[in-house]
Amino acid sequence: MNHATLGSRLRRAWRHFWLDERDSRRALPPAALQRLTALVQASEARHRGQIRLCVEASLPMAAAWAGVAPRQRALECFGQLGVWDTEDNVGVLIYVLLADRAVEIVADRGLRHHVPEARWQALAQGLGQAFAQGQVEAGLTTALAEVDRLLCAGFARAEGSPRSNELPDTPVLR
C-alpha cells in the first residue's frame, strides 16, 4: 500500500471516528424532523411510492477503514430499512453520509422503467450541493419535492384510494 492510499484511509477513518448520531441530530433538529416527516406523509398521500430519508453521521469504523463506499452503504440501508419490500416495488431511499459529505438516492426496481438512473444521480448531486452550503433541511426539502413529482408522474394514487403506509415516514438518524 502506498503512502497516499494509507494517508487517505487514515483521514477518512479519522472523520468517521469523530462523528456520531449527535451530529445527525444537529444537522436535523426536532423541528426539522417534524417538517420533513410531514412532507413525506403529504407526498405519500399523492402516490403509491414509499420514501425513506436516512442521515448517517459516519460509518462503523471497520467499514470506513475498509473503504465501504457511500453507495454501498446506501444499498445496505435500503435493505435494512425495508425500502425494497414495498408492495409495488416503488420505494425510494434518500441517504446522506455526513462524514463523507455524500448523498445517494436508491430507487427500487419498479421505478427503473419510469425514471432513468441519471435522473436520480442528478437529484443526488443537487442535494449534495445544498449540503456543501450547509443547507441540509432545504436540500432534503427540495429533493423530496422532486421525488414526489417523479412518483406522482408514474404512480399517482387513484382518487379515493386508501393510503397504505408501508414504511415509517420519520427520517432515520444514525
Image (cartoon, helix red, strand yellow):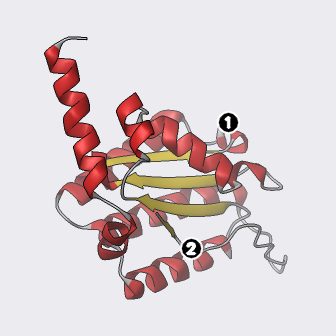
Image quadrant containing the N terminus: top left
Identify whether 9 is placed above or below 166.
Answer: above
Image position, residue 59 (x, y; %) = 41, 47
> Which one is in front in this view, the residue at disc 2 or the one at disc 1?
2
Q: Position of residue 101 (x, y in %)?
A: 28, 49
Counting from the top left corner in percent of width and height, residue 163 is at 79, 76
Q: Residues within 10 Å of mark 2 (few under 14, many from 20)?
A: many
Q: Amino acid at mark 1?
A: His
Q: Residue at x 61, y 74 (%)?
A: 169
Q: Mark 1, residues whose alpha carbon is within 10 Å: few (<14), some, or many (≥20)? A: few
Residue 67 in view of the camera: no
- For residue 16, side relative to residue 50 (left or right): left
Q: Secondary structure at mark 1?
A: loop
Question: Residue 40: which numbered mark, if any?
Answer: 2
Task: Report whether 160 appears left or right of 142.
Answer: right
Residue 156, quarter of the rendered image = bottom right
Residue sitting at 34 percent across and 71 percent down? 22
- Amino acid found under the numbered disc labelled 2: Val
Nearest the viewer among 150 and 34 is 34
Q: Which residue is mark 1?
A: 113
Q: Marks 2 and 1, Cα distance to the nearest angstrom? A: 23 Å
**For residue 4, above or below residue 95:** above
| Residue 141 image point, x, y percent | 40, 70
Give the mark nearest the N terminus, 2 or 1.
2
Residue nearest the observer in this picture, 7 or 126: 7
Query: Residue at 62% across / 57% down in the picture?
Result: 151
Q: Quadrant of residue 167?
A: bottom right
